[in-house]
Amino acid sequence: MQQKPQGKRFHRSNMSSQDEFHQDLCDDGGLDYSQTRKQRTGFGEYSQLDNNSDTSEITGMDTVLIFPRMETKLYKRRWLMLFIFSAYSMSNAFMWLQYSIIGNIFMRFYNIDSLAIDWLSMIFFLTYIPLILPVMWVLDNRGIRDVVVVGAAFNCIGAWIKTGTAHPGMFAMTLFGQFVCSIATVFILGIPSRLASLWFGQHEVSTACAVGVLGNQMGIAIGFLLPPILVPNVDDVDELAYYIRIMFYTSAGVATLIFILVVIVFQEKPDLPPSQSQVQARSTPPEENSYMSSILRLLRNKSFMLLMVSYGLNVGCFYSISTLLNRMIIDQYPGEEVNAGRIGLTIVVAGMAGSLICGIWLDKTKTYKQTALAVYVLSLIGMVIYTFTLNLGYLWVVFVTAGTLGFFMTGYLPLGFEFAVELTYPESEGTSSGLLNCSAQIFGIIFTISQGKIIDRWGTFAGNIFLCIFLLIGSILTGLIKSDLRRQKANLQQAEVRTVSKATAELEGAVPPPALLKEGK
């Protein structure tokens, strides 16, 4: 049954300011926007929904949630928050790869086998899996600042532990230092989409998420580039220890500086929300977004589960390639440790460009599924080309094919985050991102160990074909995802409500409601 919304009519003669309008609106006789939910049935008309009714089947554009009218604003300091987080993520990503890209040197220095070197990288994946759920709980209950500060502290402590391990008998201690740094990763990987939503407007949120992921990719790029330069493959063990010590102290100093910046500068969230979707998020009672119920809703979301598996397959392949790149290149091009690092750098720099382009494209077009599927298929094609050209004997060909692969494969990282937020809104961005990363860590361990064994037994070509098969599976799963862009619908619905409210007020001679969207600097 259709009916007009019940509430007061506010005439200009009775109102002296917007504050009085808002106060009267919240009186007992008026509309209670924080407690009332209505379903739109026509222009200016809504049907009442009981607060205790089950609305789980009402989705999409059929439902409009009316929340208190709030001004939105964009703050200039949002870019400072993003820069500090990106620097912190960059430092941690460098820690991840500083061993594996010169794995042959560390194998000789610590007198260990290739699997032990691989575990210096895989410890990051393994640590993430059991710790992500409690860290997501902390993110939802304590906020983004506490999570970033604690993560920066672990990153700094782990870096300083490793400064004392530049000795052939200290492998166990250097593994422990990596473990401490890996704890910091749990406090990093789910932050970009959450930070973007908290600080950035709806027309720049995907770009901001891409820039946040860019920091991690920059750290990986530096991890590919600097270790082969800082630690040359010299025969004298004492000289080698000296170079390793320089690398460890440099990374520890940078981690310390970033930790200080995080503690002093990084803020929780702006005073005013940046978008109407954040207006809704702030207006939702905490009891409606309990941690466990949120996870259960995500696990029942078919589209999100398909995305979680396909994202894990793609990023797991990237983790495996990054970890084993030194072995792949040295196997085909002996003595080319420096070029192995440069090829890794090419992969990541191309991926950074891909991430940024994807972020800008999504902000412009909002074509999440189409872009995700296209990038995924192109990642598969890039992997196939890289596989069949690696053993041709021409390093310049490897640079070109690796760059093509990186452009799409690492360009997919922020795309997956933003697509997940769209599919799961209004669930916490940290929760959805955390589950995506958990999937990536699981597949990262499986692929790294499996591909490493395949390379040892059948060679690099067979190992890369192994990854191509799973990228094909991921492409198929991506095509099965239903594109339900809930966050975009929320922003559009709020704009519709504003338009309907203003038009109705003008028709009835009432004062139009205060502006819902005022974006400023």
Image (tube, rainbow, N blue to C red):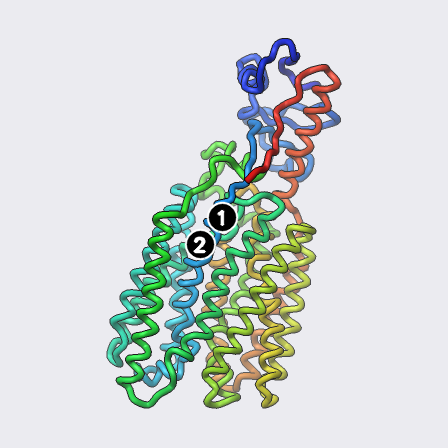
Q: Measured from the top left, where is residue 391 in percent x and y?
A: 58, 87
Q: Earlier in the sequence, mark 2 or mark 1?
A: 2
Q: Measured from the top left, where is residue 307 in percent x and y?
A: 59, 56
CB under 8 Å between callouts 2 and 1? yes
* Residue sitting nearer the eye, 503 or 375: 503
Tell me if residue 503 comes above or below residue 169 in the rendering: above
Distance in Å between CA atoms under marks 2 and 1: 9 Å
Residue denoted by label 1:
195
Tell me if residue 195 comes above or below residue 358 in the rendering: above
- Give the amino acid type for the residue marked by disc 1 in the picture: Leu
- Give the amino acid type for the residue marked by disc 2 in the picture: Phe
Which mark is nearer the camera, 2 or 1? 2
How busy is the neighbourhood of tag 1: few (under 14 within 10 Å), some, or many (20 plus)? many
Q: Please tell me which residue is depicted at 57% across the width and 51% down the height of the picture.
A: 420
Q: Measured from the top left, where is residue 4 in percent x and y?
A: 70, 18
Residue denoted by label 2:
85
